[in-house]
Image: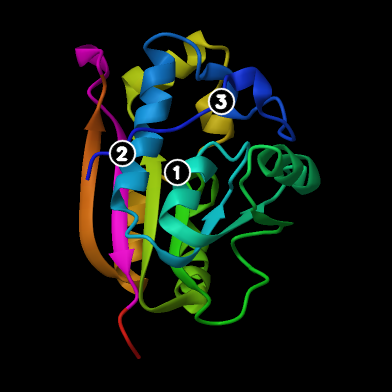
Amino acid sequence: MNVKLKTLPASRYVGVNRFDPIRFYDIPVLGRMYKRRVELCLSLCRGGERVLEVGFGSGVSFFNLAAMYREVHGLDLTADTAAVAAMFAGEGIEVALRNGDVMDMPYPDGTFDTVLLISILEHLKPQTLGAAFTEIRRILKPAGQAVYGVPMDSLPMRLAFRAMGINIGEHHFSTARDVRLAAERILKPVAVADMLSPLPWLGPVYQTGHFTREAD
């Protein structure tokens, strides 16, 4: 399923810190790459009753998720949940947002049809990924899906971030391979795919993972 990301101008988004990638969305080429990674993750979401986005940030996926699910929930370490929720309420989208950590999520067992994590898991240390996926599995309904996206770790990618003034090694601790292997230990694989850059010299720049919770 092809998904077109529905967004507002980047200046309209509120409640996030200076590291949120929404600041890149209106930049030619780079902005298209950032949007495309979200679109690829959204294309894997099956719809249903209830979705949780972990690390929702500015809520850039919320318009699309609201069209696919009856309830949209979000969990984020630092976002101003009240400001983000109020902005979307003004656009006719009701979202239930909380501050919290993927390692200890404040939801009952078996709550969600889908747990979505876009550019979140690479920020965890490899030794903690198993615990994160165990917690994701806990809050998924039986046969529910976990969908994630993580950047690829390569020299061209590190140089590209460095050109933007970002030392990615200070923020990304787990590779796409680390994340995939951890997911495979806890959940059932459906598909893992790479996203290629429109700039050939960058090669694969992003990886999406689709996994499900098997019934107990």
Residue drawn at x 64%, y 52% as measured from the top left:
94
Q: Are marks 1 and 2 in contact (CB under 8 Å)?
A: yes
Q: Considering only vertical position in the picture, is 8 above or below 27? A: below
Element under disc 2:
loop
Residue drawn at x 32%, y 27% as measured from the top left:
154
Element under disc 3:
loop
Residue drawn at x 57%, y 19% as measured from the top left:
9
Specify start and end residues of the magenta stretch as a single range: 198-213
Kind of residue at badge 3: Leu
Residue 206 part of the magenta-drawn span: yes
Residue 2 locus on image (x, y percent)? 24, 39
Q: Is residue 30 left or right of residue 58?
A: left
Rendered image quadrant of residue 158 = top left
- Which residue is denoted by mark 3 in the rendering? 8
Rendered image quadrant of residue 98 = bottom right
Rendered image quadrant of residue 197 = top left
Q: Residues within 10 Å of mark 3 (few under 14, many from 20)?
A: few
Element under disc 1:
helix
Q: Is residue 74 left or right of residue 193?
A: right
What whole-number distance in Å separates the C-alpha atoms at marks 1 and 2?
9 Å
Q: Considering only vertical position in the picture, is 125 above or below 34? A: below
- Which residue is denoted by mark 1 in the rendering? 64
Residue 105 part of the magenta-drawn span: no
What whole-number distance in Å separates the C-alpha atoms at marks 3 and 1?
12 Å
